[in-house]
Image (cartoon, grey):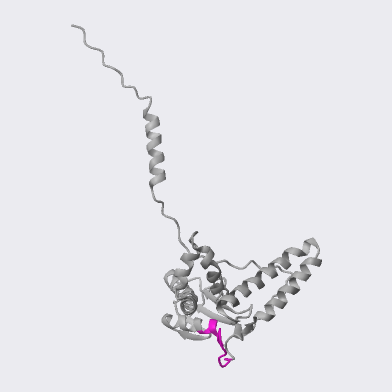
Amino acid sequence: MPRRKLEEINAGSMADLAFLLLIFFLVTTTMDTDEGIVRLLPPPVPNDVTPPEIIERNVYIVLINARDLLLVENEYTQINQLKAGAKRFLIADGIFRDLPEDPNLPQKRWVRKAELEAKLEEYKAQLAAAAEKDKESILDAIDRVEKKLIAVKLLGEYKELPPSAVISMQNDNQTSYDMYIQVNNELESAVGELRDEISLEKFGITFTELQELANNPEMKDMYRDKYYAIREVIPQRISEAEPRQSTPVN
């Protein structure tokens, strides 16, 4: 009796099935992404530009050495004291009211509604008469003034830091990554807490909640200006200097 011939398996569609499975796993699998500190660094200063004079009271210097010791304004400081010092620097002599001036802190200036409105009219007149190549810079100036006007409308007249006021952080090449992150977290937390305090006082919600509402497509028209007003009054003035070469530590 002749043996039956085995039927061949049609594998022509196996490649298509494998490809579809591959696409499925690529689409549904969560990929780990690198996380870091989001910070916009200033562009390098061109060689032909003279840097502005540094006013010591306008710079809050935070140094971390190779042994993870913290030097703030030339004094050794514990990490749990850093936030309070940074908040004091940012508030300086008050935001919405006058406080006694401290000569070691930035001298803030009042942002007045009448002055802003006069400045806005001045810029608009300049724009009307400006050459095409100059209009972009004038429009930027108008945008800055309008943002301040919105902040005054929502929060009241306030005192702002001078443009040169900044928290300057610098670490050593041998500083541990853990200490670097701790210092960053404390400085950013100082900004966040001040924003929360003002947001709670003025709007009854934290700045974090305000940000979520401002990012909600259905609520952004109601909360977006409030969100940017808080950011205008409490800017994040944290700058990182290039790490130093390791030096002997006593």
Which quarter of the figure has residue 236?
bottom right
Residue reaching furthest top?
Answer: 1
> Can residue 177 be seen in the rendering of this structure?
yes
Q: In which quarter of the image is the N terminus?
A: top left
Would residue 203 be counted in the magenta stretch? no
Q: Is residue 219 above or below residue 29?
A: below
Task: State the residue in front, 29 or 77.
Answer: 29
Q: Main secondary structure of the magenta part?
A: loop
Q: Is residue 100 above or below residue 61?
A: below
What x and y, as percent, mark residue 197? 47, 79
Task: State the residue in front, 211 or 63.
Answer: 211
What residue is rendered at 66% in x and 73% in y?
145
What x and y, as percent, mark residue 163? 64, 77
> Can residue 238 be seen in the rendering of this structure?
no
Region of the chain picked out in magenta, as a range: 88-102
Task: State the residue in front, 26 or 175.
Answer: 26
What residue is rendered at 56% in x and 84% in y?
96
What x and y, as percent, mark residue 11? 35, 25
Which quarter of the figure has residue 77?
bottom left
Residue reaching furthest left?
Answer: 1
What x and y, as percent, mark residue 112? 65, 82
Q: How many marks?
A: 0
